[in-house]
Image (spheres, rainbow, N blue to C red):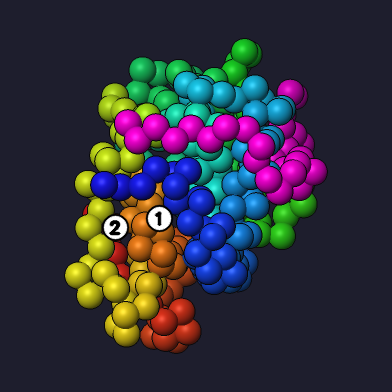
Amino acid sequence: MPQTPAGILARLRSVHPSSPRLVWHGRDGRIELSGRVFDNWVAKSSNLLADELDAAGGTLVAFDLPVHWKSVALAFACWQVGAIAVLQDGVRPGSASPTAPTSPASPEDPQGEADIVLSSREGVDVDPPRLLVCVALGSLALRWDGPLPRGAVDFAADVRSHGDVYLGAPDDAGDAPLIRTGGRSLAAGDLAGLVTLPADTNSGSSGDAPTVLLEPGTDLLRALATALAVWQQDGTLVLVEEGVPVTDRLLAGERVTGRLGTA
């Protein structure tokens, strides 16, 4: 039976918590997060969502974000407070021009039904009572680069002031909806069925936990499903920003035991 996100976070905190669990290769360099550090980011993000944005069980949070380590941390934060991540079906959010404004909400637009919108793009605007969180993706970004829309929350500037521990009761129901996309609601079991790890990664080449690289160009739904699958095996997930080459040196340096395609 697949573990819930709460169970995954508990393992990240308790099973080799200083070992790398999420490695990001982006245009601005490499970032490595241990289980403890990833859990800290999730806790800080959870506290921001709950304390500043009143996110709770059933809150809909739209992800206008590309695949990124911050997107993964924010998804786990949503699940920790009981919120539902709303994803565009078959679309890689954030892949459009970074200055392109959003079009008006439509029935197919997840932002139209969300209570909170997380976006890394400039020019995004939302109508009250929906709330906008601007997420700077630079790994060392301390604030949003550019004018902040009126009423928006600056994730990079605000999240660091929140506690490293989430003291609320985590949502741990195995059948609780985690993601809404394409008119479907997906729980942990549904996400487990979306990804099959390569057979040779089940226990690593020498009996150790696997290190799985997810090929660049995937969508956020697949990235989140892969994270759950890899971390159930106490493994390491390697994400690569689209446009960054996957070289032999990268594969050897990360000790990748298996690669997973975009579909």
Say whether residue 234 is magenta.
no
Give the label on residue 262, or none.
2
* Separation of residues labelled 2 and 1 (CA atoms): 14 Å
> Which residue is located at x 76 percent, y 47 percent?
160
164 in relation to 207, above or below: above
Looking at the image, is mark 2 or mark 1 nearer the viewer?
A: 1
Q: Residue furthest top?
A: 129
**Label 2 Cα crowd, 10 Å radius (few <14 / some 14-19 / many 20+):** few
**Residue that mark 1 sits on:** 227
Position of residue 47 measured from the top left corner of the image (x, y, whole percent): 68, 36
Front-lying residue, 260 or 145:
260
Amino acid type indicated by mark 2 = Thr
Q: Residue at x 44, y 47 (%)?
A: 7
- In the picture provided, is 159 more to the left or to the right than 118? right
Percent across and percent down for residue 208 are 37, 78
Residue drawn 76% across and 37% down? Answer: 147
What's under tag 1, amino acid-wise?
A: Ala
Q: Which residues are magenta?
A: 146-175
